[in-house]
Each structure stands twice: as structure tokens, then as C-alpha cells.
Image (cartoon, rainbow, N blue to C red):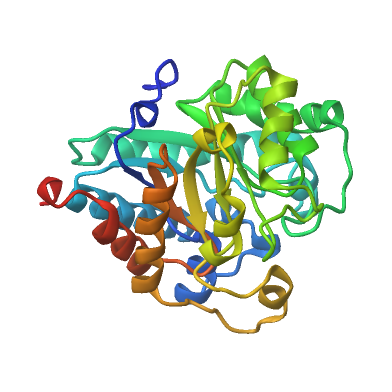
Amino acid sequence: MARYRQALPQLAGELFLTDGGIETTLIFHDGLELPHFAAFHLLREPGGEAALQRYFRSYLELAQRYRCGFILESATWRSSADWGQRLGYSAAQLADANRQAIALLEALRDEADLDRPVVISGCVGPRGDGYQPDLAMTADSARDYHQQQIDTFADTAADMVCAITMNNAEEAEGIARAAQRAQMPVALSFTVETDGRLPTGQSLAAAIEQVDDSTAGYPCYYMINCAHPSHFRSALGGNGWRLRLRGIRANASRKSHAELDACPTLDSGDPEELGRDYAALLRELPRLNVLGGCCGTDLRHLDAIAAACAPPLQRR
């Protein structure tokens, strides 16, 4: 049963952590194969569910140590229709995989020894490549495409949905409309290039304002992910729209998306430096309180981020 769907606790302003780069961790650190970067595919592989459990437990233990709330983000970034078809899933099998991914998180939440809230989020990814806005959709067609996955989450214990690595405003708008139709809270996370703009060339401010204007402000909040803080810090000027930014899931690397795609090894950057970058962002963004990582980040990075950002008196 959903625990926080009617009142997401992170909206109250206390610090919440989430995980790091799940796909890069599973591939480069755990040595697992993820076809099409699809972490949910592990649910049908021998030992795959146990690998996901180990991954999420390590972050729950970190949140417990720093006495922060935690958002369990499901391993379903790739479990929408087009990607499922490429992996050989029928529509029914894909829906089952989405339900199984949430059930895994529900069991982990039930066993966790945290004195702060643990929110379950159903992760939604882009229809196409996260770095390339190569599938131009209208907001209506994006809503229709993502509706099935979001409706599946609505029938589980998921408290919310979160769209990760959105590279264009129209798809983000469609996801917001699908979530509204399913009566699910939604957070939208945009990715930007090294100039702080979306891959379409639109500014972050304009993208957020476009989605808010077209949906009457339905998203609970917005995030930035899959970019290093040095890529987007200069884009954070302005007033009202900055109050809608509540989450950051940055890359460890300063490399561009094109450079990361061409890189044969994992660039883990500097965890301590990334922690300092997050602390600086907390001072710049008045409502920022959801902190996680993206490509190249792992438990070391989240530990450094929490050490730099969590109030010292609340730590164990």
C-alpha cells in the first residue's frame, strides 16, 4: 500500500537522500550485464534480484547513518513499451516487471530501520536516448506513450513517479499529464548539456515554465540529473522557477554527454569535490533537499554528499 502518496514528506523541506548511478554501478562495479542499460532486466536473471537488494540496502544504511529521509527509486528507467519490446518483453511481462520492481522496494522499506520517512518512487525514463532528443513527440503523444507504465505504478505501493533524464519539455509535459490522469504525484528531472541548456537548446528555466504553464503547475517539483554541477550552475539565475527545483542527481564526471558515450571506462570524478559542489548548491537553491547521484556516482559519492550537506547534530 502506498504510504505517502497523499502527502510526500520531502515537500516539508527536510533533507532526503536517494541512490547514485544504479546502471553504472551495476555494470562497472558489480560486473553485471545490462542490455540497453536496463536494470529492471535483472529481475528475470539468476541472482539479479539479490544484486538489486544489496545495492539499495547499502544506500538505506547510509541514510540511517546520517538520519536523512530516503527515496527508493525503482530500477525501471528502461521499462517502458519501446525498450521492453527491444528486450523481448510482452506488454503483460513488462507490467509484471514494473510491479515486481516496486514490490522489491516495498519489502526493503518494510525491513529498513530508519527513523525518517522512506518514499517509494516509480522511475520513468525517456522514450528515446536520454542524451539525444531524437524522438520528437507532442505532449499528448508522450502522455499516451507513458500512461501504461504510470498506470501500473498507480496500482502498486509507489508513492510517486519520477521522470529521469528528460531532454525535452514536451515529453516531460506528457508525463506530467499522464501522472495527473493516474492521480500520482510526479517529479520531473531534466538533463542539460555543458552549457546548462537542454539538448534541444531550450533553457532550463524555459522548460520548467513551459511544463508548469501547460499543466497548471501539476508537478510536485523539478530536478536536474545526468550533468555535473559545473555544467548547470551558471544556468540557475532567475527567481520564481528556481523555487521549483528541489532535487539534484549529478554526474560524477565533468565530461560532456558525447564524451561519456565515447568513454570506454568509468569516470568517477572526485567524490569529495562533488560533496562540496552540493553544499554550494544548497546555499544557492532555497528549496533544494533531495540529493542523489547519476552516472559514475556510487556509495562513496553519496557518503561525501551527505557528509557535506546533512546537519551534523542529526548524524549517528
Q: Quick check: 244 left or right of 150?
A: left
Residue at 38% x, 41% y is: 289
Name the residue: 68% across, 64% down. 35
Is residue 26 toward the left or the right of residue 234 in the image? left
Across and down, in percent, residue 200 comes to 82, 52
Q: Where is residue 302 in the image (x, y as percent from the top left)?
A: 35, 60
* Whether residue 107 can be seen here: yes
Quadrant (top left/top right/bottom left/bottom right) for the N terminus:
top left
Q: Position of residue 199 (x, y in %)?
A: 77, 56
Identify which residue, 108 or 188, lies in the foreground: 188
Residue 226 can be seen in this image: no
Image x and y of residue 144, in percent: 81, 27
Residue furthest bottom as drawn: 264
**Is 73 situated above or below 42?**
above
Residue beneath the point at 70% across and 20% down: 215
* Left or right of residue 78: residue 168: right
Rendered image quadrant of residue 151:
top right
